[in-house]
Image (spheres, rainbow, N blue to C red):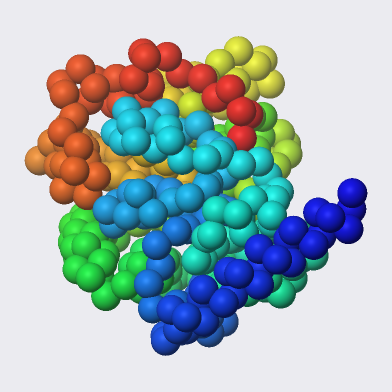
């Protein structure tokens, strides 16, 4: 049985490589790890082996090219694009034979995932592998470097798809630059001693957070927050100790990933934290993907700016900005009811839950 399965994989690979050679590997892209990746002239079928892939392809208007994607459960994914239900969902480790059978032209992956042996096998089978995010592995040392990394990531997806997608990517980059400049102009003059201390809960445990390479950290910094994890060695996601949190004494706590505020509010260890005493533990909205990793991180920045410094952002209408973003980049018109739910940190069903604990 094993040799038959192995033979099937090899035969599928040979057929796929012959097809790719017929199309011609006429171009290369440089991925987020700095590798030059040869690509066929046309990329029609894509394997999304990292969770941020779908949202970016949807933004660029190319979600119909996704042959298979890693299962995830972001709340506004299906309502904004019912067609995505037809995309084949896969588990945490892809089946190479399935990828070959689906005739994918390219796969997107994150740094360090899937397992190296699986990556080697994909490469031997002739499937181009593009590293499209390295957030958990690469420390970012300035706002400007962070901003450029967000734009570079989206431009990479557009480059893989083809030159006709560059305009949409540049529209988002221009919007992002404009929003960042507006927020920075109003927050960069805040004295360090006057900045609001902010802690982000990623979940599923209240001590689990995002590190120094994340959307939540850098968009918080841009929005003028004193991000209390700033002196930790944490780059990707991970745990901090309760002793550290008590010492930091955050004034505001944001709960992400559709976990409940009860993670903090109902735990007596947090009772004396300033944010709890002042009732400033907030359940963050989420979108087509979670704000801690997606292009919607720019909305997270606007949310934090308004949340921490409303007097500096009296003209910032979050309802307008959210509606405009979804119409402009996702081609989806949000109803007033949907905006009410999103701003309240709820999903389209009016609930807040993370069934996958991811």
179 relative to 268, above or below: below
Image location of residue 112, percent across then percent down: 69, 62
Quarter of the rendering containing residue 45: bottom left
x 15%, y 21%: residue: 336
x 39%, y 54%: residue: 65
- Quadrant where the C terminus sits is top right
x 58%, y 69%: residue: 16
Image location of residue 349, percent across then percent down: 37, 14
137 relative to 312, above or below: below
Image location of residue 271, percent across then percent down: 60, 18
x 46%, y 18%: residue: 352
* Along the line of sight, the residue nearer the viewer: 64 or 100: 100
Residue 145 appears left or right of 199: left
Q: Is residue 328 visible?
A: yes
* Along the line of sight, the residue nearer the viewer: 273 or 38: 38
Q: Is residue 34 visible?
A: no
Residue 135 appears left or right of 289: right
Quarter of the rendering containing residue 169: bottom left
């Amino acid at each position: 049985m094993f040799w038959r399965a192995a033979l099937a994989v090899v035969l599928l690979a040979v057929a796929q490589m012959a097809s790719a050679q017929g199309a011609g590997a006429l171009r290369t892209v440089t991925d987020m790890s700095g590798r030059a990746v040869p690509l066929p002239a046309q990329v029609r079928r894509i394997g999304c082996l990292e969770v941020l892939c779908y949202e970016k392809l949807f933004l660029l208007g190319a979600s119909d090219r996704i042959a298979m994607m890693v299962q995830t459960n972001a709340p506004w994914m299906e309502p904004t694009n019912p067609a995505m239900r037809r995309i084949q969902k896969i588990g945490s480790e892809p089946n190479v034979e399935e990828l070959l059978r689906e005739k994918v032209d390219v796969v997107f992956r994150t740094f360090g995932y899937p397992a190296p042996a699986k990556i080697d096998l994909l490469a031997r089978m002739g499937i181009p592998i593009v590293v499209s995010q390295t957030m958990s592995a690469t420390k970012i040392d300035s706002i400007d470097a962070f901003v450029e990394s967000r734009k570079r990531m989206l431009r990479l997806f557009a480059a893989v798809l083809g030159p006709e997608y560059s305009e949409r990517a540049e529209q988002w980059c221009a919007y992002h630059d404009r929003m960042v400049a507006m927020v920075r102009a109003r927050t960069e003059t805040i004295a360090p001693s006057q900045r609001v201390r902010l802690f982000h809960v990623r979940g599923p445990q209240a001590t689990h957070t995002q590190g120094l390479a994340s959307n939540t950290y850098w968009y918080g910094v841009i929005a003028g927050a004193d991000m209390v994890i700033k002196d930790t060695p944490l780059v990707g996601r991970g745990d901090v100790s309760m002793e550290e949190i008590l010492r930091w004494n955050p004034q505001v706590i944001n709960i992400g990933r559709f976990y409940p505020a009860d993670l903090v509010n109902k735990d007596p260890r947090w009772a004396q934290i300033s944010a709890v005493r002042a009732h400033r533990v907030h359940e963050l909205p989420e979108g087509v993907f979670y704000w801690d990793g997606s292009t919607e991180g720019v909305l997270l920045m606007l949310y934090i700016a308004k949340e921490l410094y409303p007097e500096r952002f009296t003209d910032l209408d979050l309802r307008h900005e959210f509606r405009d973003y979804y119409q402009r980049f996702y081609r989806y018109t949000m109803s007033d009811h949907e905006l009410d739910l999103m701003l309240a940190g709820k999903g389209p069903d009016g609930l807040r839950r993370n069934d996958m604990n991811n």
